[in-house]
Amino acid sequence: MAESVLEINDNNFETEVLQSEKPVLVDFWAPWCGPCKAISPVIEDLAGSFSDKIKFTKCNVDDNPVTPGKFEIRSIPTLIFFKNGEVIDQIVGMVPKTKLEEAINNII
């Protein structure tokens, strides 16, 4: 995983995401999920370009069931964009890089 994508969990979600000074992208994923593996390099690439403006994080839904439950994650990958502790946008499934860039530009 790229250093610019932070692995988060149920214990540090509030601190790293809800209390973050910057907007946050949370990638809810699992190791067995094909589309999750496919979108991961795209997110890492975007983190390289936008990490000064938005925090990039990943949350493994198998290891951390509480947080995905709070946000009613039903399919993965699910990408949720937070700003000031609030959900701003949500994208479900594998999408083109341009759609993610558009969502990031709308939040920053």
Image (cartoon, helix red, strand yellow):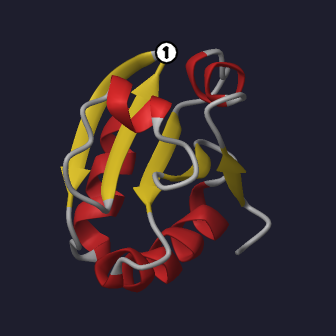
- Residue at 71%, 53% in the rendered image: 6
Depth check: give the residue in front, 83 or 52. Answer: 83
Regarding residue 108, the answer to whether it shows in the image is no
Q: Which residue is mark 1?
A: 85
Type of amino acid at the residue the image marks with label 1 = Gly
Q: Quadrant of the N terminus?
A: bottom right
Looking at the rendered image, the quarter that the C terminus falls into is top left
* 42 to the left or right of 69: right
Q: Residue 38, how many percent across, how many down?
A: 38, 85
58, above or below 77, in the image: above
Asked if residue 108 is positioned above or below residue 6 in the image, the reply reads above
Q: Is residue 108 above or below residue 75?
A: above
Q: Position of residue 68 (x, y in %)?
A: 39, 37
**Residue at 36% from the left image edge and 77% from the top image edge:** 33
Where residue 4 sits in the image (x, y, percent)? Answer: 73, 61
On the question of residue 106 being in view, the answer is yes
Depth check, front residue: 67 or 85: 67
Above or below, 12 against 81 in this view is above
Task: Return the x and y of residue 72 as percentages of the image width and height.
Answer: 24, 32
